[in-house]
Amino acid sequence: MATYLRRVDDTIVALATPQGVGAIAVIRLSGKEAIQMANRVFFGKNLEVQASHTIHFGTIRDGDRIIDEVLVSLFVAPHSFTKENVVEISTHGSSYIVNQVLRLLVRQGARPAEPGEFTQRAFLNGQFDLAQAEAVADLIHSDSETSHQAALHQMRGGFSSDIRELREKLIHFASMIELELDFTEEDVEFASRDDLRLLVEKLLRVVEQLISSFDLGNVIKNGVPTVIAGKPNAGKSTLLNALLNEEKALVSDIAGTTRDSIEDEITLGGVVFRFIDTAGLRETTDTIEAMGVSRTREKMKSASLILYLFDLGDTDLVEINRDLNKLENIGVPFIKVANKLDKGNPQFITILKEAHPDTLFISAGKKENLEELKEKILEQVNLDKFRTGNTVVTNIRHFDSLTRTRESLLDVLGGLDQEVSNDFLAMDIRRSLHYLGEITGEITTDDLLANIFSKFCIGK
């Protein structure tokens, strides 16, 4: 494993709770001298002789001056998050108190921690692998039930276990083929090529499943951008307000009221959907409105889902069919939503149901059939695979490494088909092992670690 450029032999300190005034704040120390440093400014029990996982009441003092009454939690190495000595000081949440304590500990010799440095030390000290370390950040930022479950599964080693199992099976064959290279003149075969083919084909199936799960994983982690699109006055803003249950968007009978997109989020079935109310789609000579229409089309192209909303009292079948053809050309999944059910002509509704039986009929203004719409929206996200406990890939870095692993495994199969020499076969297997190792951290570079841990918050 490559070593990371940050020093790991000193003691670091940082605020572990969010910045700002709150009821309490937690200041975290980690390093060989963490307990001694805390003990020099803590007045209460002698922290250096206390047991791990104990909490002690006392005061933090700068000389004779009392800064605050605190609770100090002790975690003695290796029984801590970082596997180093860790002290967590719970103070009152005043920013003045926090700054005073931090400055005092820095004067004692502690170094201000950099982003993600506590988790980085946990990784370097073998507390968990790199995929689990990344899951810590995902867990902190999870804002829905599904994103929380996915991050927790990964942090507890579910994904890493799958990757390690794949890698260990491949390592065995790699070592046998490498051994054959030492006995080239004897023409011996330690690794059965038929068995290797069966293994690589099995690994490919697993890797393909993990790669295919990324679309769902991306939805779970980042939410579903959902555009509400349609003509002016179709009721898009009214629908957004009804879904959010608040007056987020301005509603008016005047066509073209919405000139730019308005966004907000709701959670359906444990998945975050980011709804985007857009400018009405129509030809216009109004320069500002035309810019809004152009942005609407761009939003539709980048969306994961489109709610095509039309007014039952102001749209004919020809116009609907024309709009649907345009939507199909965009290539983004969409739901047909007929709005203002209370104003629709019964005969036209019957014709529309026959022509487009999958249309959902609602009244956004009266909040009619909105639950059915929510269920239809949630159906667009296939959570069955996630709910059965299968591993779901949520990280773009892991997706990229798995994609490269697949390419390397396909090269192994190609080499077997062409009966290439052991040198080339071993090279392709080593590449597969390399990319799998990148995921869990068996293979790392300083740049990779710097990129990952720089995205963490300070204090974690």
Image (cartoon, rainbow, N blue to C red):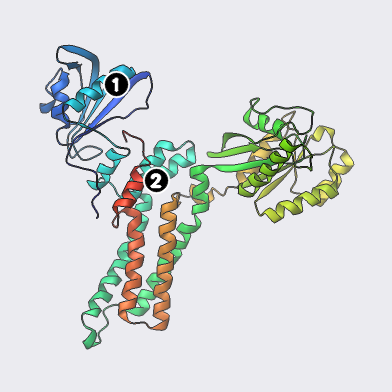
Tell me the residue that label 1 is attached to: 98
Quadrant of the image containing the N terminus? bottom left
The three-letter amino acid code for the residue at tag 1 is Val
Mark closer to the chain start, 1 or 2: 1
Tell me the residue that label 2 is attached to: 153
Instruction: Where is residue 454? Give x, y as percent.
Output: 35, 42
203 left or right, relative to 117: right
Q: Amino acid at mark 2?
A: His
The correct choice, above or below, for 176 with respect to 255 in the image is below
> How far apart are labels 1 and 2 at the CA level?
34 Å
Rendering quarter of residue 169? bottom left
Q: Nearer the viewer, residue 100 or 42?
A: 100
- How many other residues sit within 10 Å of disc 2, few (<14), some (14-19) or many (≥20)? many
The image position of residue 373, as x and y in percent, is 68, 39
- What's the residue at 32%, 59% (across, down)? 437
Tag of residue 133: none
Q: Residue at x 30, y 72 (%)?
A: 173
Q: Could you tell me which residue is drawn at 22 percent across and 46 percent down?
A: 125
Q: Is residue 156 visible?
A: no
Residue occupying image coordinates x 32% and y 36%: 460
